[in-house]
Amino acid sequence: MSGPRAVLVGPMGAGKTTVAALLADAWGVAARDTDQDVEAAEGRSVSDIFVDSGEARFRELEAAAVAAALAEHDGVLALGGGAVLDPATRERLAGHPVVYLRVGLADAVKRVGLGTSRPLLIGGVRSRIKALLDERAPVYESVATLVVDTDGRTAQQVADEILEALHRD
Ligand SMILES: Nc1ncnc2c1ncn2[C@@H]1O[C@H](COP(=O)(O)OP(=O)(O)O)[C@@H](O)[C@H]1O
Ligand SMILES: O=C(O)C1=C[C@@H](OP(=O)(O)O)[C@@H](O)[C@H](O)C1
Ligand SMILES: [Mg+2]
């Protein structure tokens, strides 16, 4: 199937955006991120979309961004952490190389910090991340063709494992 060389899924703080850029560099292709696509199309941040238009509207924009990127991008694609909750998105992922970047609670909390750029975490980073990790792990597993653990490893070590597993030159 044509399309991205790798699609990265997993929770917030798994390193999808960061590792996508490393993989793209190694392969000499472009990295794309659906959060950035949505922000560019809307001219406002993910946080502003959540606050002003609601999560449901964000999910519609996100689903459209994923569909467009799967159809037209042949580099590396990072999805937002919640994109795979949409059944139509999961169907579209079938046949693509989908890498699930797994992360545990402690490392995820450390990585996302206390910033406000992830609206789902406002009001309790640790408890919200725990709920999201528990609820979504089976969904990520269901779409993944490769699972990579990221706890205690640098983004470069994670990228290297993916490069090894998908070895394409
Ligand atoms: N394996 C890693 N180890 C430590 N920090 C990481 C790792 N991967 C990413 N990070 C850092 O964690 C934060 C979140 O990474 P990001 O790529 O935005 O994750 P995601 O897109 O999955 O939410 C960033 O500050 C990034 O530099
Ligand atoms: O898990 C989620 O539902 C979300 C993850 C975020 O992307 P990252 O996973 O890249 O942080 C972003 O799409 C939005 O804040 C919602
Ligand atoms: Mg990201």
Image (cartoon, helix red, strand yellow):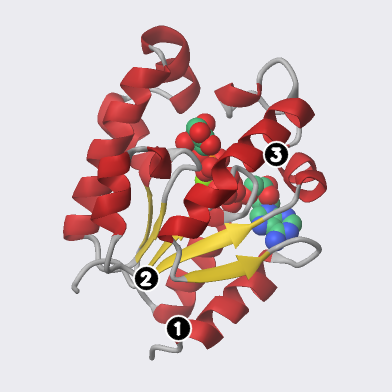
- Label 3 residue SS: helix
- Residue closest to the eye, 126 or 25: 126
Q: What amino acid does circle 1 point to?
A: Leu
- Real-space Cα separation, disc 2 to disc 1, in angstroms: 9 Å
- Real-space Cα separation, disc 2 to disc 3, in angstroms: 26 Å
Which badge, 2 or 1, comes first in the chain's sequence? 2
Is 21 on the left-hand or right-hand side of 133?
Answer: left
Q: What amino acid does circle 3 point to?
A: Val
In the displayed structure, 45 sits above or below 157; it is: above
Residue at mark 3: 112
Residue at mark 1: 166
Which badge, 3 or 1, comes first in the chain's sequence? 3
In the displayed structure, 58 sits above or below 140; it is: above
Q: Residues within 10 Å of mark 2 (few under 14, many from 20)?
A: some
Residue 97: mark in rendering: 2
Q: Is mark 3 within 8 Å of ligand 1?
A: yes
- Label 2 residue SS: loop
Q: What amino acid does circle 2 point to?
A: Pro
Where on the picture, by quarter, is residue 111?
top right
- Label 1 residue SS: helix
Question: Residue at the spot x=45%, y=17% of the render?
Answer: 50
| Residues at circles 2 and 1 in contact by the CB criterion of under 8 Å | yes
Which badge, 2 or 3, comes first in the chain's sequence? 2
